[in-house]
Image: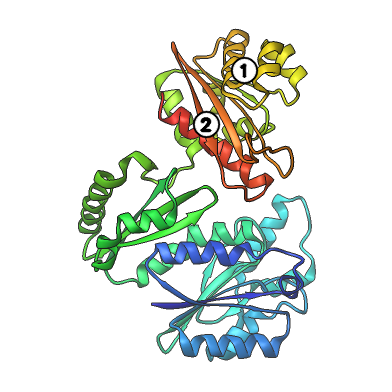
Amino acid sequence: MKTAILSVGTELLFGQIVNTNTVFLSQQMNMLGFDVMYHYTVGDNPDRVEETMKKALEECDMVITTGGLGPTQDDLTKEIACRVMNDELVMMDDVLDEIVKYFGTLGRKMTENNRKQAIMPSRAEVFHNDAGTAPGFALENEGKYIICMPGPPREMERMFEKSVVPFIERMSEGALYYRIIRFFGIGESSLETELMDMIDGQTDPTLATYAKEGECSLRIASKRKTREEAEAAVNDMLEKVKERLGKYIFSCDDEELAEVVCKKLIDKGLTLSCAESCTGGMFASSIVDIAGASECFDRGLVTYSNEAKVQELGVKEETLEKYGAVSEETALEMAEGLKSVSGSDVCVSVTGIAGPGGGTKEKPVGLVYIGLICGDKKSCRKVQMRNVNRQWNRHYALLSMLDMINKNI
């Protein structure tokens, strides 16, 4: 089914707000097997919104809108959708009750203009908003669909997952099943090349590669008469992918690398500590972002200066003078010192040149050394990154640390 995404809001055109809704919806709709053909962004101008909505419906079977469902005078998406879909607006008392109840949970009285949000298209399937006051809805006319959701990402994403996905799945013929495979250490172009024969000859299941900062993903999707048939087809294809590229796969269920590492550590009853220089706490933050990290994570030290490396980790001054802060020797001494201080089962350290300055011919920007102690095993990985920018270098160093742990525990 051909789909267009229409974002409404002058603030988007002015660049005051980053339009993350379009990215989210494009990813989710593609995963559900829909073809996203167009992205539209229109300001709060009723004529232009209506013109764009009509144009999108001429080209596509479904239009998903975000924004313009608020209580103010310039929130007119509902009114426009009604005109385009030949419907009329009516007050829905049950929707009004939900809005009043929501204000009650906040300890506030509903203002009169919020009543507008309970006025909905008469034929609409209404979507409850449990994170705000603006309900969404789906409206059908002559085989075409408009789905309208609020603009705030937190509200939109929850509504999409709780209400829109079930609605869309009811519309779809057959059962769709997909899995997202995550890779580290191979680029998207190389991934596609390795799987080109499968991709070129694909019918069902389908394969699609996606690039992300420092890693890439593969979506394997199948649509069959039953979920069981679709699931079997996807898993059979997954085994073929594993045979070729298993060494790069860190998750077959769209998990973050930090989440995979945390789960492994917890399952094995291992504790983790880190000593960071160039990443400046990014590694510790990525671990603490994972729910349940307290079961495995002991401590994180940021030893950015040479003095801190000596004082906190016991790195020898002679090592720093002879080999420099960015060296295998220093990375290993950082890990060893961390082991002495923390007693953790897994101790990881990182030191490198994030840039943009500080590099030399012998030690260019993007050079990183990662020290690791797992039980009685001690190792060091040298990583030379392509110098994109400081933030990217630090992010890739973080992923390399996680990958090294993942492959050694």
Residue drawn at (71%, 17%), measured in percent from left and top? 321
The correct choice, above or below, for 9 with respect to 357 in the image is below
Relative to 134, 267 lies left or right: left
The correct choice, above or below, for 74 with respect to 107 in the image is below
Which residue type does callout 1 highlight? Met
Nearer the camera: disc 1 or disc 2: 2
Q: In the rendered image, which residue does mark 2 sit on?
A: 382
**Which label number is shown at residue 56?**
none
Q: Answer yes or no: do the residues labelled 1 and 2 have beta carbons within 8 Å? A: no
Q: Position of residue 173 (x, y in %)?
A: 29, 72
Q: Position of residue 121 (x, y in %)?
A: 57, 81
Give whichever of discs 1 and 2 has the lower sequence position. Answer: 1
Quadrant of residue 10 within the rendered picture: bottom right
Q: In the rendered image, which residue does mark 1 sit on?
A: 334
* Count of numbered labels shown in the rendering: 2
Quadrant of residue 23 within the rendered picture: bottom right
Look at the image and tell me in which quarter the C terminus lies: top left
Q: Gap between marks 1 and 2, in whole Å?
A: 15 Å
Q: Nearer the viewer, residue 143 or 20?
A: 20
Residue drawn at (53%, 38%), measured in percent from left and top? 399
Look at the image and tell me in which quarter the N terminus lies: bottom left
Q: Position of residue 244 (x, y in %)?
A: 27, 47
Relative to 42, 218 lies left or right: left
Residue 365 visible, this orientation: yes
Q: Secondary structure at mark 1?
A: helix
Relative to 273, 117 lies left or right: right
Which residue type does callout 2 highlight? Lys
Q: Nearer the viewer, residue 2 or 210?
A: 210
Residue 88 visible, this orientation: no
Residue drawn at (45%, 24%), measured in percent from left and top? 265
Q: Position of residue 371 (x, y in %)?
A: 54, 23
| Circle 2 crowding by C-alpha within 10 Å: few under 14, some 14–19, many from 20 | some
